[in-house]
C-alpha cells in the first residue's frame, strides 16, 4: 500500500487557544471546510465522523482521535472505507497574538497502481481542499 502526504498552512490573527476552540468544534467544520459536516468527541480515543459531499453524493470519513493536546495538536486515525491514514492539526502561537495552523494528512492509497494513478487526479483536489479550508478558517477570525 502506498502512502501520500498532503498539507497546508495558514497564519490566523488569533492566539492558538481561541483557534483551538473553533477547530475542534466539529459541528462548526461546515463553516470552513467546503461541502463537509462533522460531529465527534473531544478526547483521545473518541470518534469523529465527517460527511463530505453534495446531498447524497459523497463519502463518510470515520476517525478516531489519536492525540488530543489542547491547544496545540489534535490527530486522528482515519478508519473509513474510502479514507484511511493519519491526519492532524498543529497550532503554534507566533508573534503578534497570532497562530500558525498546519493541516497534514498521510493518506493510504488503496488498489496499488490504480490508487497511485488515481492520486494524480485526486491529489491536486485534496491540496486545494486543505488550502481553501484553512483560508476560510482564517477569515472567521478577521
Image (cartoon, rainbow, N blue to C red):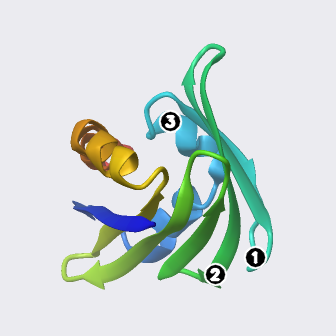
Q: Quadrant of residue 65?
A: bottom right
Residue under the image location 32 percent in, 82 percent down: 93
The vertical placement of 87 against 110, above or below, is below
Q: Return the x and y of residue 22 as percentages of the image width and height.
A: 54, 56
**Gap in Å between the C-alphas at discs 2 and 3?**
22 Å
Q: Quick one: SS at disc 3?
A: helix
**Gap in Å between the C-alphas at discs 2 and 1?**
6 Å
Name the residue tied to disc 3: 31
Q: Is residue 131 left or right of residue 3?
A: left
The vertical placement of 78 against 38, above or below, is below
Name the residue tied to disc 1: 43
Q: Which badge, 2 or 3, is on the more N-terminal residue?
A: 3
Of 22 and 105, the residue lying toward us: 105
Residue under the image location 23 percent in, 81 percent down: 94
Confirm or deny contact between disc 1 and disc 3 (CB under 8 A).
no
Q: Return the x and y of residue 86 as percentages of the image width and height.
A: 51, 70
The vertical placement of 60 against 94, above or below, is above
Q: Is residue 37 left or right of residue 8?
A: right
Confirm or deny contact between disc 2 and disc 1 (CB under 8 A).
yes
Question: Which is more foreground, mark 2 or mark 3?
Answer: 2
Q: Which badge, 2 or 1, is on the more N-terminal residue?
A: 1
Q: Which badge, 1 or 3, is on the more N-terminal residue?
A: 3
Name the residue tied to disc 2: 68
Of 142 and 10, the residue lying toward us: 10
Q: Is residue 86 left or right of residue 105?
A: right
Amino acid at each position: 500500500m502506498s502512502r501520500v502526504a498532503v498539507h497546508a498552512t495558514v497564519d490566523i490573527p488569533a492566539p492558538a487557544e481561541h483557534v483551538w476552540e473553533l477547530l475542534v468544534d466539529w459541528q462548526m467544520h461546515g463553516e470552513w471546510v467546503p461541502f463537509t459536516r462533522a460531529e465527534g468527541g473531544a478526547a483521545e480515543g473518541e470518534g469523529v465522523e465527517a460527511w463530505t459531499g453534495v446531498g447524497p453524493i459523497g463519502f463518510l470519513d470515520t476517525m478516531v482521535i489519536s492525540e488530543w493536546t489542547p491547544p496545540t495538536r489534535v490527530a486522528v486515525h482515519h478508519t473509513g472505507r474510502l479514507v484511511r491514514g493519519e491526519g492532524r492539526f498543529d497550532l503554534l502561537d507566533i508573534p503578534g497574538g497570532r497562530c500558525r495552523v498546519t493541516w497534514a494528512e498521510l493518506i493510504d492509497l488503496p488498489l496499488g497502481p490504480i490508487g497511485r494513478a488515481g492520486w494524480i487526479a485526486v491529489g491536486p483536489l485534496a491540496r486545494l481542499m486543505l488550502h481553501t479550508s484553512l483560508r476560510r478558517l482564517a477569515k472567521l477570525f478577521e
